Amino acid sequence: MTKPTGGSWQESVLYSFSGPSRSYPRASLVLGSAGALYGTTHSSTTSGTVFELAPPSVAGGVWTETVLYAFAGGGGNILDGAVLIGPGGTLFTTTQGNTTPGGTAVALAPPTAPGGSWTQSVIYSFAHGGPGPGTSPYAGLVSEGAALYGTDYYGGDDYCSPSGCGVVYELTPPATSGGAWTPTTLHMFTGWPGDGASPLDALTVGPGGVLYGTTYIGGTGSPTSCGPNGPGCGTVFQLTPPTAPGGAWTESIIYTFTGENGDGALPSGSVALGKNGEIYGTTSYGGSATSGSPCSSGAISGCGTVFELTPPPTPGGAWTETVLHSFTGQDGDGAIPLAVSLSVPQARSTAPRPPAARERAPYSPSCRSAGAPRLSGARNKSLPCRQLGSTVNSIIHSGTDPASKQTAKHKRLLTAKKTPNAATIAAMEAARRGEVKETSLAELARIWEGAFAKSSGRRSSPKP
């Protein structure tokens, strides 16, 4: 979507999917370092794929789709979650289906030579009735430090169904290359009336490693039946890490949806974090546009909402919800939003580094939760990826005006062919708490691509 100065928004179709093996891309796209987009297809008749969309070499040209990996199994490996870009271009995601009934977490390593094949490896298999976390990881993965975090739709407490109410889990990488990843259940949902249930989308990593997410049903309010699996219209929750290693994570319900009096219901997407701690997201149903609404789920009418949650002025107080928009599904308006893709500054997390590469330069790129706005690091030797990523992220989160001397300094540093010193990096990290106007994001992307081209000695691809 582009908006000319003084004009209306204009839509451009970058690519149209076709065929049984390349259909139903349900998850958000992820932006790579060279302007390419990465995503997954669900495919209900065969198995899912992971694909790349490469931008054209000239403005207005055709985007090129490449299937990086097609999962085998005749419908046995279905992908609903987005990908997470890891170090060296490795892609992480999840599958669920018949080949491994409980689902898997997988890694896709890029080829060592141009034109080669991507290599898929299963880093963890979820098993029904097993000792590990739950099953059916509909959501993709996020990272903080070296660990991966995700949600399972089933598992844990059996109040919601014999399969459980869902869990939040952590996957810790092995100490040596080729070893087994270690699963840890961080929280088991128990459902209404005290907890949420059935998480559908990825987590979001906030400051201090706090995890934020949504559950499709459950909550602490009225037992209004919003879904087929149990009472409650869904929640927004947070999980706070322990103060000491090995301690328990602490879950807090930030907000419970009611589906009444204009409130939304049944959130199926992840959330985005604002610079002052606000939380933004969507619900699939509910809202104020209920009269003659073409959308309904159970007793809930309305085509969904976009909401904002404002934190309390004092710790422990109640969060305040504001419905920013109620979808009508009529007269050109949308309906039933299933995911979040908002241009809201978010807390940064570091992608997991494979054991064999932990002490090797260049550093891993700065990667955030899947589906969140990002500018990943580039693979080059002149500017280490972690420092280049920190520079760009500091500009995105800088509270200074784009024309200010401080931002100009960041731009010069970004395009320079030298590594930022420790003092500069520390200063830019401190500036991360602010926010820059969204209109500057495209400019920052061009700066990023220019720095990548300058440091790697290749020509960057123009933006369409």
Image (spheres, rainbow, N blue to C red):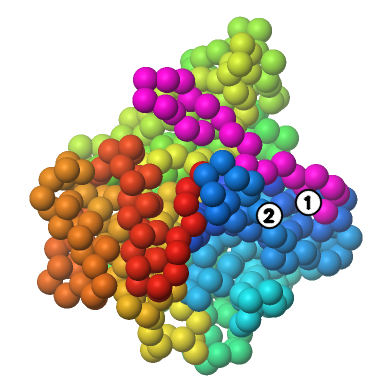
| Quarter of image, res 109 | bottom right
Residue displayed at 26% across by 63% down: 414
Please, is residue 171 above or below residue 168 in the view? below
| Quarter of image, res 321 | top left
Q: Main secondary structure of the magenta part?
A: loop
| Magenta span contains residue 9 | yes
Q: Which mark is residue 104?
A: none
Residue displayed at 62% across by 42% down: 14
Disc tally is: 2
Region rendered in magenta? 1-24
Q: Which mark is residue 22?
A: 1
**Which is more N-terminal, label 1 or label 2?**
1
Q: Position of residue 24 (x, y in %)?
A: 74, 44
Look at the numbered disc 1 and give the secondary structure of its residue.
loop
Question: Quick one: 186 or 144, which is closer to the camera?
Answer: 144
Q: Are circles 2 and 1 on residues that touch, CB within 8 Å?
A: yes
**Residue for badge 2:** 65
Q: Amino acid at mark 2?
A: Glu
